[in-house]
Image (cartoon, rainbow, N blue to C red):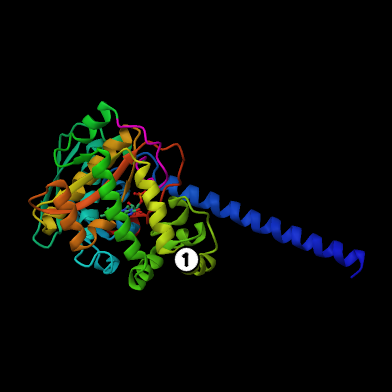
Amino acid sequence: MNRRTVLTGVGAIAVLGAAGFGQRRWAESRYADAAASARLPMDLAAAGPARMAELVRMATLAPNSHNTQGWSFAALPDGMRIAVDPARRTPVVDPDDHHLFVSLGAAVETLIIAATAYGITASPQVAADGTVTLTYADGAAASPLLAAITRRQSHRGLYDGAPLTEADRMALTADPGLRLIEDAPTRAALRDLTVAAYGAQMADAAYRAELKSWLRFSQGAALETHDGLYSGCSGSPALPQMLGEGLFEVLVTAKGQAAALAAQIDSAPALALLVTDPDTPAGRIETGRRLARIGLAATGQGLAMAHVNPGLENAAGRLEVARLLGVTSGRPSILLRLGRAAEVMPYSLRRPPAQTLLT
Ligand SMILES: Cc1cc2nc3c(=O)[nH]c(=O)nc-3n(C[C@H](O)[C@H](O)[C@H](O)COP(=O)(O)O)c2cc1C
């Protein structure tokens, strides 16, 4: 190989490297734009169908299991109908659709709060199958939770461990259904139970396959569907999708994941439990509504929040949590960790309203 071919080779590598870097930066900025445009401030001048679309855009910013966005919206003359989208079920982790209906409830409540920006009171009626009809009436005061809708996110990083303040406790327990757990022994017991359940899930081929189908390892893959769990939102580096899927099989072990989850739970000064009672579609939707309010209240307080639900995703775990916390009625439904986090995490994506708003 002469000097000229070496230089040509080095030049080619430099060009390819720069192209790869450029492509990565381009994907990063397209991802950031998409996340930001889903969270633009509400257009308060919007009317008619544009207003409906704004309300759907806000509603879909709600927390939802695996970010499957398993909902659909239909505009009514003076309201909105919201139903689950069965095509977006996750039958392995959520065989009885509990999470699906909780997610729907979170979207319903977020829409109700968003509607107050237009002075609208949206009153929900839940059918036996869990379809929700919202009826609009004029005359609502803007909700104090409104401003947090576009800022709330699930923060899966480490928290700083500092105890909640009295103001945090008051804001969170404004919802009487929330059980705050701050004492160390109970948090440790819940951690052990959660970590064991997560280890078992990650050792289960069906669970892994379902999870993998919702993992988006690169910004590009996330942008193709605008749903699912983008690895950056869990603090992991972006990778080409196929490489990520391959490494997931080899490097993402039950043991490693369980240890990471234990550290995350230990970094949080508080856990919080929501109980669904009765455990019906309507009861689950009610839980989702409370979950949405709590997420927004936490965001308003500058608190980070993430779900740590694996222990509640099997019947034995739910029984154990009920025993530990003295829950005598209903289903232990949602377990959260709360605290303050310095790390800035990317926001997750949402499908645009045109994809979920049926006309
Ligand atoms: C019912 C339900 C269960 C969830 N379970 C988990 C969980 O166990 N672990 C987790 O990291 N996130 C969990 N999440 C959070 C979602 O993954 C998250 O809301 C979704 O990816 C959208 O991201 P965002 O909350 O940042 O908008 C859950 C959310 C809901 C509504």
Closest to the observer, 197 or 88: 197
Judge whether 213 appears above or below 264 on screen: below
The C terminus, quarter of image: bottom left
Residue at which label 1 appears: 248
Confirm whether residue 63 shows in the render.
Answer: no
Left or right: residue 10 versus residue 204 is: right
Left or right: residue 7 versus residue 187 is: right
Q: Amino acid at mark 1?
A: Phe
Where residue 145 sits in the image (x, y, percent)? 26, 35
Where residue 299 sits in the image (x, y, percent)? 32, 37
The answer to whether the beta carbon of the residue marked 1 is less than 8 Å from any atom of ligand 1 is no
Where residue 326 sits in the image (x, y, percent)? 12, 47
Closest to the observer, 296 or 358: 296
Farthest residue to the front: give it. 185
Where residue 70 sits in the image (x, y, percent)? 28, 61
Left or right: residue 22 versus residue 64 is: right
The image quarter containing residue 143 is top left
The image quarter containing residue 148 is top left
Judge whether 170 appears above or below 85 on screen: above
Magenta residues, start to end: 151-164
Confirm whether residue 210 shows in the render.
Answer: yes
The total number of labels drawn is: 1
Q: Residue at x 87, y 67 (%)?
A: 5
Left or right: residue 46 versus residue 128 is: right
The N terminus, quarter of image: bottom right
Q: Secondary structure at mark 1?
A: helix
Magenta stretch, overall SS: loop
Closest to the observer, 182 or 156: 182
The image quarter containing residue 103 is bottom left
Q: Residue at x 42, y 47 (%)?
A: 347
Crowd band around label 1 with a 10 angstrom C-alpha radius: few (<14), some (14–19), many (20+) = some
Magenta includes 133? no
